[in-house]
Image: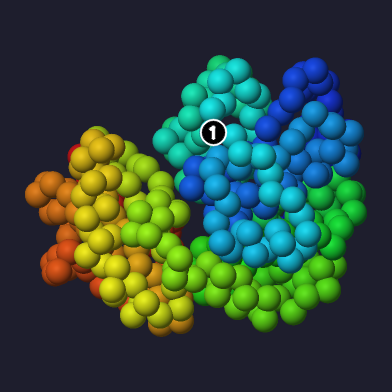
């Protein structure tokens, strides 16, 4: 089935919808990952190509090692850092929950959302363009928008969008991956002139290089906050090629998780230690007794040595957040 979402001349290339005088930041979630950063860059590039020169990419924090490797490879500059959205107009990419958005964001200043996550309760004062599709990465959605608007994709932009899909789907292994993601990577890889699986391994290596990372970096590198029916939670994820690499830092990581829980007044802090080769996650937990009961219910096991180990669990979005939400539902 083909859905025609936009006729040419409709929403996304219609400058009258936006206020041309204002700078508009395209920005992903806090603790930005590759999909968040590259979606900001590639969507801003698309808007610029459509004549909206006031649209600029931004990142809601420091870019991670994987993204750095990628931007260096394609010689694309890192976007400016945006950590305070006071009075700023923004287009949100790769998230739609205020808890994950750049600080001091006024929902009235959100002009668009392009995402692939669950709908997380954002409310706006007026109608906005909101495109959310259940695919593996925002990058693939943006690649489609290039096609629909007949904007040619450069080698660099193709490389970034392809990498976003490979990164978010863990080289197609995550259950979030759809046939559309694979088809998009195939197309984009041709434009970028790259062997996607080979390049994807390079991305994974860059992502899982934790040698220079502190326990705090490991916890906060990819960390999102959630509210499960009143239970305040933070859920992070670190992907490595071999869980053994994380073993020496486990004690320090748990200490950081406890610090975070107290400092941020959370009921629980969870960190997925994901082994991308074995396709399994050791899910660390610290939190209140009530939260522990919900966590055990969610994963059908007993917490032992501060964690529950789950085979075949790779995706926070699809395999960790939904069971937690279910377990805490009142
Ligand atoms: Mn994403």
Quarter containing the C terminus: top left
Residue at 67%, 70% (x, y): give it: 182
Up-down relation of residue 124 to residue 224 (above or below) = above
| Count of numbered marks | 1
Residue 18 visible from this viewpoint? yes
- x and y, in percent, of residue 317 in the image: 44, 56
**In this orientation, which residue lies closer to the viewer: 131 or 220?**
220
Tell me the quarter of the picture where residue 263 sits. top left
Tell me the quarter of the picture where residue 249 sits. bottom left
In the displayed image of the protein, which residue is found farthest to the left?
289
Quarter containing the N terminus: bottom right
The residue at which mark 1 appears reads as: 83
**In this orientation, which residue lies closer to the viewer: 238 or 301?**
238
- x and y, in percent, of residue 287 in the image: 17, 49
In the displayed image of the protein, which residue is found farthest to the front?
212
Up-down relation of residue 128 to residue 41 (above or below) = above
Q: Is residue 49 left or right of residue 72?
A: right
Residue at 49%, 24% (x, y): give it: 104
- SS category of the residue bearing label 1: loop
Q: Dot 1: few (<14), some (14–19), or many (≥20) neighbours within 10 Å?
A: some
Whether ligand 1 has any atom under 8 Å from the Cβ at mark 1 is answered as no
- x and y, in percent, of residue 229 in the image: 26, 38
Q: Is residue 237 left or right of residue 122?
A: left
Residue at 63%, 59% (x, y): give it: 68
Residue 133 visible from this viewpoint? no
**In this orientation, which residue lies closer to the viewer: 244 or 177?**
244
- x and y, in percent, of residue 324 in the image: 28, 52
């Amino acid at each position: 089935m083909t859905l025609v979402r936009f006729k040419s001349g409709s929403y996304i290339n219609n400058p009258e919808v936006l206020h041309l005088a204002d700078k508009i930041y395209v920005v992903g979630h806090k603790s930005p990952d590759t999909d968040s950063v590259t979606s900001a860059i590639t969507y801003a590039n698309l808007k610029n190509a459509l004549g909206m020169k006031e649209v600029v990419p931004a990142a809601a924090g420091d870019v991670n090692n994987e993204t750095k490797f990628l931007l260096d490879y394609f010689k694309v500059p890192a976007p400016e850092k945006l950590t305070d959205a006071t009075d700023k107009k923004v287009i949100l990419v790769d998230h739609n929950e205020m808890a994950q958005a750049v600080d001091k964001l006024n929902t009235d200043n959100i002009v668009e959302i392009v995402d692939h996550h669950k709908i997380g309760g954002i409310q706006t004062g007026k109608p906005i363009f909101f495109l959310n599709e259940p695919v593996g990465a925002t990058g693939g959605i943006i690649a489609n928008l290039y096609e629909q608007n007949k904007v040619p994709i450069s080698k660099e932009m193709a490389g970034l969008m392809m990498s976003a899909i490979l990164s978010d789907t863990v080289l197609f292994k995550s259950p979030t991956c759809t046939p559309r993601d694979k088809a998009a990577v195939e197309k984009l890889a041709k434009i970028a002139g790259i062997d996607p699986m080979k390049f994807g391994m390079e991305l994974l290596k860059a992502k899982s290089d934790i040698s220079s990372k502190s326990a705090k970096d490991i916890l906060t590198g990819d960390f999102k906050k959630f509210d499960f029916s009143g239970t305040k939670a933070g859920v992070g994820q670190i992907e490595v090629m071999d869980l053994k690499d994380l073993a020496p830092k486990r004690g320090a990581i748990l200490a950081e998780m406890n610090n975070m829980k107290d400092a941020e007044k959370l009921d629980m802090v969870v960190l997925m230690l994901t082994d991308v080769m074995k396709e399994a996650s050791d899910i660390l937990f610290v939190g209140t007794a009530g939260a522990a009961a919900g966590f055990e219910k969610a994963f059908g096991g007993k917490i032992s040595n501060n964690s529950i180990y789950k085979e075949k669990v790779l995706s926070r979005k699809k395999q960790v957040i939904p069971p937690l939400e279910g377990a805490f539902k009142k």
